[in-house]
Every structure is written in C-alpha cells, then in structure tokens.
Amino acid sequence: MLEHRIRHIGLQSRVMTADEAQTWIRDGMTLGVSGFTKSGDAKAVLQALANRVEESGERLSIDVYSGASLGDTDGILSAHHLIRRRLPYQSDGLMREAINAGELEYVDQHLSHTAELLRGGSLGEIDLAIIEATAITQDGGIIPTTSVGNSPIFVQRAKHVIVEINMNIPEAFEGLHDIYLPLDRPQRLPIPIRSVRDRIGSMSIPCDPEKIVAIVPSTLSDTPSSIVPADADTLRMAGYILDFLEHEVRYGRLPKQLAPLQSGVGSVSNAVLSGLVNSAFEHLEIYTEVMQDAVFELFDAGKVSFASASSLTLSEHKARRVTNDIARYRDRMILRPQEISNHPEVVRRLGVIAMNTALEADIYGNVNSTHVFGTHMMNGIGGSGDFARNAALTVFVTKSVAKGGRVSSIVPFVTHVDHTEHDVDVLVTERGLADLRGLSPRQRARTIISTLAHPDYRDALLDYFERAQRRGGQTPHLLEEALSWHNRFRETGDMRKTKNLARVM
Amino acid sequence: MLEHRIRHIGLQSRVMTADEAQTWIRDGMTLGVSGFTKSGDAKAVLQALANRVEESGERLSIDVYSGASLGDTDGILSAHHLIRRRLPYQSDGLMREAINAGELEYVDQHLSHTAELLRGGSLGEIDLAIIEATAITQDGGIIPTTSVGNSPIFVQRAKHVIVEINMNIPEAFEGLHDIYLPLDRPQRLPIPIRSVRDRIGSMSIPCDPEKIVAIVPSTLSDTPSSIVPADADTLRMAGYILDFLEHEVRYGRLPKQLAPLQSGVGSVSNAVLSGLVNSAFEHLEIYTEVMQDAVFELFDAGKVSFASASSLTLSEHKARRVTNDIARYRDRMILRPQEISNHPEVVRRLGVIAMNTALEADIYGNVNSTHVFGTHMMNGIGGSGDFARNAALTVFVTKSVAKGGRVSSIVPFVTHVDHTEHDVDVLVTERGLADLRGLSPRQRARTIISTLAHPDYRDALLDYFERAQRRGGQTPHLLEEALSWHNRFRETGDMRKTKNLARVM
C-alpha cells in the first residue's frame, strides 16, 4: 500500500518513523509546514518532536510558518513552548493564550502575502518543509491531501523536505489539486484564471527528489471543524443577506447566478451558504479559501456547479463522507495554493462576493476582526483582507451584542482596525442589513446606528454621534469618549454601566 | 486650428462656448469629469456653471465624480455650494472646509475602486461626462490631455459628453495615452501588462459621436502643483530610503535596477525620487499614479528608462517645459486610466516599491493618512491603499513631529486607520528608518519607538508601551490612555502638556 504511494523508486528507501524523522528538526530552524484551517496539516513529525522534548526536557525554539491554522498541533507545540515565531494564522486556544501572554512572536498576515514575502527574502530561509501528502509521483512531485495552503512555496524554497504520507486519505484525492507557482519577477505573468473552474497548473507540487530526506507514513486525521450550529440570530442574518442578493439581482446589479462566492470560516458564513440550498439561485460558483460543510450541501442539492478553495475544513461527520466519496466531487472542485485562492488579481477579475465575520464595527463601518478589546488576539486576519479589499461586494456580519448584551458590537470607535470603511460595502447584524455603498461617513453612521445597533445601545450611539457632529469633521468623533465604552466594560463588566452606577445608559 | 483638432466632420457643428455648454447641467445631475491631481481637469464648463449661479442666484446641487482632485475648480464649485456629493478624492482648501463643515457628502475611495463601483451599479448613472481633450479623432475618440483618470469609464457610461478642447496642449500629446477598459464580467480578461512599458489599449477614449453634445474650445491651464521645497528633514528621510534600497540590493532582496517605483504626491516623495538623480541606480522604472517634477529630472539625468502614470502633476515652470517638449519624452512614458495605473493585479505582478506619506503612525505601525486628529479630512486616501496593500515593499514617511513639536506623529494609537499594520513594511521619520517586515506587534513597537519617535516623546511612548504590556495581549494598549495624547493637544495645544500643568511629560 505505502509503496503504491511512493512512485519514485529511489525515494522508497527514505521511509522512516516520525520519531526518526523529527531528528531533522534543530533549535533555531524555520519550518514551513502544510496545513490550512486545520486541514491537511503536517501532524506526525511535529507531534513526535513534542514527545522528544517532553521526554528529554530539551529546550528548542523554532519558527513555524504554515498555510493557516494547524489542527491540534498548534496547541501541542505551544504547550511545549517550542515556538519562537508563528505565522501567518492560527486559531488554537492554547496558542492564543501563549500569544497574548507574549510568549511567542505571532505575525498576523494577509494569507495571500506570505508566499510573496518569502520570495522577497524578508522572512528568511525555510530550513525544512514538512508536508502531508496523498502520494509522491514518479518524478518526486508531492500530491497534497485536504489542503494546499503555502506548501508549494515551502517545498520550492526549503533546503530539505519531509513528507508525511497520510494512509487514510484515499488515493482518489489525486487530481483534486491545481498547483501554480507565479514566476519570479520580472518574468511574472498574468495568472490565467478567467473562471472559477480554470485549471492552470500541475496536479502535484514539483519537488527535487534529492531534497526529500524522510517519508513518514501516518494515519492521523485532520482535527474536525467545530462550527457552532446556527441559532436564530445567525439564521436571521443569513436571511438578510439572501434577501439583499435577490434585491441586487432584481435591480440588475448582479446576474441571476450571482457571482463567485467567498465565505469566511464560521457559523454565519456556513449558514448563509446553507440558506442558498432552499433559494431560487442556481448554477452558483464558489471562489473561496475554505470549503465548509455547506458547500457540499449545495453540491448535493445541485445548486453549486463548481467550487475552488485552498482547503476542505469539515465537521467529523461530513469529512468522513466527503473523503471517502471524493471521486464524486472531484470534477466539480479544485484546491489551489492560497496565494492563488486569495490573490487580489483573481478576486477582482472574478468579481467575488465576499462574506466575512467581524468582532466589532464602528459607526462609520470600520471593522475589527481580530483583536478582542483591541489588545488580545482572537485568531488572525486570515484571508478576509485579501477578499474584502478586492471583491466586487464585501459583506461583514456580526451579532449586535456579545456577552449576554453586556458588549455592543457596534461601537463609537473600534479598538483595532483590520478593514477600513473603504473596504466595507455591507454590514449585517441580526437587527438588519446596512448597504453603505456610495455613502459618506456621516451617512454611514446614521444608517449603521438605526439599522444595526441593538436597542439597548442605539440611543447612546446616536447621542455620541450627534454630540460629535457639533465639533465638525468628515468623520465626527469625541476622542475623549471614543473608547469609553470599552473602558466601561473593563471597569464594570458591562458597556451599559458606569463604575459608580451614577449614570446608567 | 480648432478644426484640426476635431477630425470627426459631423462633430464640428457642436462647437460652442462654455456658457452655452453649461446649460446641459441641471439640478440633481451626476457629472463624471476629467481630472487627476489637478491635471487635465475639465475647467471651462464648470467655471461657466459657477458664473451662471453667481449671476442668477439659482440653487443647484450636483454630484461630481472625478479621477482625483480637480484644480481650482473644486474650490470654485464649493464656494458656490454647487456640490451635493463628491468622490473619490479632492485636495482643495475651500472644499476641505465645506467637507469638514458637513456641507457636502464626500466619499473618500481607493482610486482603483471608483470605476468598478460604477460598473457594479452602486454609484448610480453618469448623466453627463465633461472631459478635457487634446483632440477628437475621426471616429469620435477623445484624446486626453495631462491626465487620464476615470475619463474612459465616465465616457463609456455617460448619457451625454461635453468635450473641452484645450488649445494650449500641443497636439503632440497624441500617442501619450494608453486607454484600456476591462470588459464586463464574466468576460473579464487578465490585464496584459507584464512590464511598465507595455501598451495594451488605444490612444484615445472610444466614444459614440452621437453622445457628444458640445465641444468647447478652452485655453485654461492646469492649476500648478505647489510642492513645498525639500527641507533638511525631508532630505534626511529621502537619504534613509536610498540607503535602505542600496542595502536591499546588497543583500540580494532587490535587483540592481530596483523595481518599478511608485511615489505619492508630496515633497518627501518628490525628494526621494530627486535623490535618485545622484545615486548609483540606473535603468529605473516608474509605475505610479502621478508623475511629479522629479520624474523628469530623472529622465533628463538618464536614470529612468520608462515611466507609467495616470497624470502629469508639475510645477508651473516644469509644466511649461515638459508640455512644450512632450515629443522628447513621449516614447518613454505612458498615461493610463487610474484603474490600470493603480490596479492591484498589476501592482502585485510588477512588484512595485510604494512610497507614501502618513499624517501619523502608531507604535504598532498602523497609519493614518487622511484624518487630522481622527475627524477632519485632509485630502483623502487616494491611491495609497491600492499601492500599499499590493506592493512588494511598502514605505510610509512622516516627520516625527508637527506644529513646532507640539504634536508627535508617532502616537500610542492612531485616531484613524487607513493602512493597517499588515500593509506597512517600512516607516521613516527624520530620526531614522524602521524595517518592520516579519516582526510581531510588540517587536514593531520597540523598533518604532526607539528608531522613529522624536526624543521629546520617546520616553512617554516607551512608558505607555511598557505599562500596556503588563496587561498582556498581542497588541498591548491602555484603552483609557490610548487617545489621551490627542485629547491633551485639544485641551492645551501641546501633546506634552497636561491641562493643569501638574504633570509635564
């Protein structure tokens, strides 16, 4: 079975255990590892490394570059204090704690940027790439598993490569991937994607077989996605977006089959896509970074004709079904490198409709999607900026309140900006949908406050805006009060309460 | 002479005065007018409109869409309260006052976005385009003058078109422009620019002659650019950037001829380019939105082999020389529509080095380039976001202090974010240059404070950062103090002084 999957004869002698392979990892190294949103990540060797330091008590400090979040491995590496620098994205609870405690340097990057920064030389060299694979071709090409991520650029630039052959991934995954690496400048060419379904590269990641120093058979599964089931608010938001899309079709601003859809990771995005199952829309296309469960519901309902992404991030149940049935879907989907799935060139050319999640938004439509109260990292910006800036239509969604109503997600001034008002066309809460296109900041504020804010906070927001307006300006603010809501929460645990309770909003 | 410039025989009968042509403008209309950074703007008809309302006392309210800033016309229109909505950019003192007084709706947009938003239908219809031209071709094509801007999309979408033939622009301007309009989706193709010098379109803006309702001869000149001469600080910043570029070449991260350069409008950008005259660099290329004086110094010094932009924005002296001598430069330069000069696809493909100006930056490298104290609009974001996000190397410059030292340009928390830390590679003040690539926010803060801040503020910034760090987080802040520096200035006129002078930093 394993020999089947190592078609380059000379490489068969490099098979070893994860324990043996992990000895390639030395203190101070920079690793480029496969994995995008918990899928297709290199698992066996990194976990063996954690076991090594667990047993030996050795202190090791490495830089780990990936596609996006790894599965449980991010937490395991953090727990063992193995990471010095981590980029470009993570979403693990333990690692989040370590980041916010200042224990490691986390460099939060646009997901389309990392490959370019590597080419540009500002992120140093990749000492070792560790890539999960379905198989290795006769000429050493690496066929990825459930994600592509940054693996092609890591393999291209790494001094050495370790391949983890995941025996649980059916060989039918071959043919799913489309590997295209932009040429170095000035030879760089236009990316020849004109439609979601265009194949422009090879089915495996080109690799000089000499660089492959170890091949490790593995049977570890991807960490399943844990999407919170849609609640009433989530479904309401999904409903507003579907109504809005229908409205845009009616007014001739979108074609009947819409435009290629991108949706971020999360329950609202998943719910919007699920909502399309029962809509009148047909022949839909997806151009996104992550395919969640809903994409396969849409395939099965005959609503989606083609989907392109960089990874499959599925619940345990859906993953089992899709993985074993991959041949059924293979001619309707492509997994691409993340610099292509998220490339501004392609996103703008195709006119993508981008839907992503905000942590909070301010009355002018600036969006914070990463930092809790402006300081503590949640996950990272991921691909949201790649899509939001370049999409034909950019939607952000958030519930109007959090923490049982004690925090308003619509605030006078966001504590951190990931997406500026220039990049936010439509904002949605369970209260409604605000179409901000073509509006000036003052017009945006009136619309956002009246349409999106929770009633508990609406008057206070309006009061802030009206008093701010008296001082004039394109974007009126009272800087001495702008962050007071967040301070009030820090002091009292509730944005609505002042410290001495003398003034309740 | 004029007949020479109207080569479509049927159109010669549509010649009229500006006073006659302005009667096409009615209350409530949306105008799309030529003009980019004060150059090639439609001047005669709009000024005749101002005269009309001046004399008649009529009240008129119109939406004016342009390429970027108009020259004196923006001020004239504002003074006559003629504008209801203005986009995507302006830089006029009178209009700035009107915007900040809330008298008109100013929609500040990425300059590459406006054409797409028009295609998407969210900015309504263009009732009338008014385009300054060198000549009209036999088939009705409009040859622009000193800028291209958004004129092609305005002409394509307008119901009617008025052409102002500027008799002071030599006919030798023909051949300077390269007009390419992306096709509507899903027919959209890759933009076939692979090098700064690639010509991909036509020399004139295609126009159905039936749409041209008036042709107005004019002799009004562009409003000259008024660049503040470089001072010692400006030259020091330019020097740091040149040293840095040489350093990057030495370490193999940039080729000897660098990469296509973009530089924003302003004296620092102009000084950086001027500095290249005496550098060792050769065969340089420019891919930018505005060619300022320095580009022609570089041409004359044999340093630049080709330049592409959307406009020529020159001082009075330089404009006279270049305009009359245009044939000398014409085969070494191209003027493109702004959606092409600023297109993320092309900017990323070419690997542009982008240099733009910040109003203020925070200790984490977030940049405010538009809003004075977070509320009052200076000019607008212009093309800085198009370039900063997609460039291979993004540099922002600002002096470390303003207002005679009473304002620090390096602050704990910027009052408005136009460019997030993800998009800012290098920050420069007259104190030094901070290379932020690959650094986490805490590492960025230490570098920015120690390298860039003015000594009067350095200790206070460090104190803020250290106290903030005790609360933890990826991006430590003390939200209750984050904007206190700006508040202090508002109360005392000096960021260094507290109100009661009890505590002097």
Image: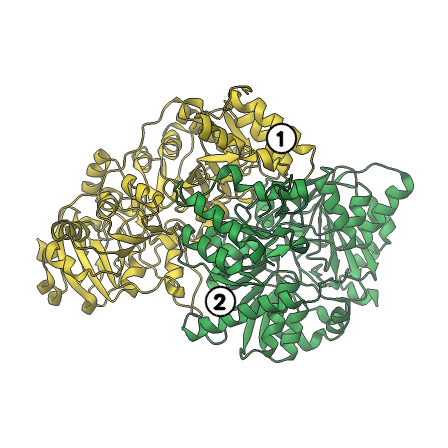
Chain colours: A green, B yellow
Residue beneath label 2, please? A194
Q: Quadrant of the N terminus of chain A?
A: bottom right
Nearest the eye: B279 or A392 = A392
With A413 as the anchor, is B298 left or right in this view? left
Q: Residues within 10 Å of mark 1 (few under 14, many from 20)?
A: many
Image coords of residue B23 (percent x, y): 14, 60
Q: Chain of mark 1?
A: B
Q: How far is disc 2 from disc 1 in space, using C-alphas? A: 48 Å
Nearest the eye: A72 or B31 = B31
Nearest the eye: B459 or B231 = B459
With A197 as the anchor, is B8 left or right in this view? left
Q: Chain of mark 2?
A: A
**Is there any visible trace of residue A67 in the rendered image?**
yes
> What kind of element bears circle 1?
helix
Image coords of residue A414 (percent x, y): 55, 46
Name of the residue lying farthest toward the right? A55
Amino acid carrying label 1: it is Phe
Task: Please name the residue shown 46% across and 47% down the image.
Answer: A465
The part of the image, by quadrant, that contains residue B285 is top left
The part of the image, by quadrant, that contains residue A97 is top right
With A58 as the anchor, is A479 left or right in this view? left
Residue B465, labelled with which disc? 1
